[in-house]
Image: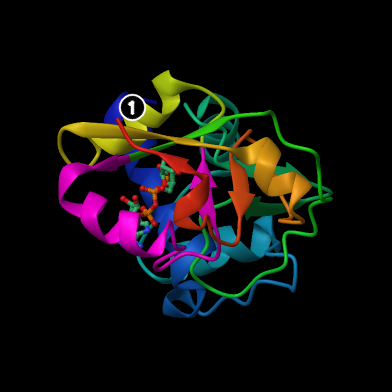
């Protein structure tokens, strides 16, 4: 399978496993899972045929391990806008985490802290390089340093998705360091 086809399938999965399952008539369970055969049939019925082998390849080779397959079911590991409970345990985070954003959001973030916006959580990266890539999606990246250890000590619950993204409900401005 070529790179373009992989990306096309990955974007299709993201759209329907994170944001708009109803668009192809599938229902995610409370933890975000849908049976693989149900997904493939629904996709084919809606004009986008993916083979089971292609699906496996996309899940396995995905640059960010965005999807997980378990017991014949698939889900997105993070990034949902639809309401799902990923059922991830609360963990102690590293002392610092990073958030990649862009300059035009900085004034608002200084004011209100990081908010989940259209997603369910604020996404934090374990290292600067990853945060830089996240910010670059929108323009010249600005990397904020998050005092995750202090937040944890103050009772904020951190979780980590299957693909290593740290998730938290919000980051108040007092825990952020701006460049
Ligand atoms: C910003 C991708 C104004 C925030 C990435 C970000 C990530 C505020 C944008 C994952 C704000 C939300 C998530 C505030 C936050 N005022 N702007 N108070 N608080 N923002 O896409 O973190 O490829 O929902 O800085 O790699 O950019 O989809 O979040 O710029 O892991 O797997 O509002 O998406 O992964 O944008 O990205 P997003 P994100 P995938």
Q: How is the image coloured?
A: rainbow
Residue drawn at (60%, 62%) of the image: 169
Specify the quadrant of the image occupied by residue 85.
bottom right
- For the image, the number of numbered tags is 1
10 Å neighbourhood of mark 1: few (<14), some, or many (≥20)?
A: many
* Location of residue 30 with respect to 8 vertically, above or below: below
- Judged from the image, the secondary structure of the residue bearing numbered disc 1 is helix
Could you tell me which residue is drawn at 66 percent across and 48 percent down? 151
Within the image, what quadrant is residue 134 found in? top left
- Foreground of the two, 76 or 124: 124
The location of residue 149, given as percent across then percent down, is 69, 36
**x and y percent of residue 162 in the render?**
70, 39
Name the residue at the front extreme.
174
Q: Nearer the viewer, residue 76 or 115?
A: 115
* Image quadrant occupied by the C terminus: top left
- Residue hosting label 1: 132
Residue beneath the point at 40% across and 67% down:
117
- Residue 33 picture location, percent across and down: 71, 62
Q: Nearer the viewer, residue 94 or 154?
A: 154
Q: Is residue 50 rendered magenta in the image?
A: no
Q: Give the answer, above or below, for where 128 lies relative to 112.
A: above
The residue at 52%/69% (across/down) is: 42
Q: Is residue 42 left or right of residue 110?
A: right
- Measured from the top left, where is residue 131 in percent x and y? 40, 30
Q: Is residue 173 above or below residue 16?
A: above
Q: Is residue 66 left or right of residue 112?
A: right
Q: Is residue 28 left or right of residue 2?
A: right
Residue stretch in magenta:
101-124
Q: Quadrant of the N terminus?
A: top left
């Amino acid at each position: 399978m070529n790179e373009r086809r992989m990306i096309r399938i990955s974007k299709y999965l993201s759209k329907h496993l994170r944001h708009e399952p109803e668009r192809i008539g599938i229902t995610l369970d409370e933890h975000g899972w849908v049976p693989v055969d149900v997904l493939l049939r629904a996709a084919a019925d809606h004009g986008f045929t993916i083979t089971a082998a292609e699906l496996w390849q996309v899940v396995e080779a995905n640059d960010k391990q965005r999807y997980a397959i378990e017991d014949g079911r698939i889900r997105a590991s993070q990034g949902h806008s639809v309401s799902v409970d990923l059922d991830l345990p609360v963990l102690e985070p590293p002392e610092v985490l990073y958030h990649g954003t862009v300059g035009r959001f900085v004034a608002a973030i200084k004011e209100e802290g990081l908010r989940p916006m259209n997603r369910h959580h604020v996404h934090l990266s374990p290292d600067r390089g990853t945060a830089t890539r996240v910010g670059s999606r929108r323009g010249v990246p600005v990397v904020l340093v998050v005092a995750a250890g202090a937040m944890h000590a103050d009772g904020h619950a951190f979780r980590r998705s299957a693909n290593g993204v740290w998730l938290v409900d919000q980051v108040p401005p007092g825990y952020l360091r701006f460049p």
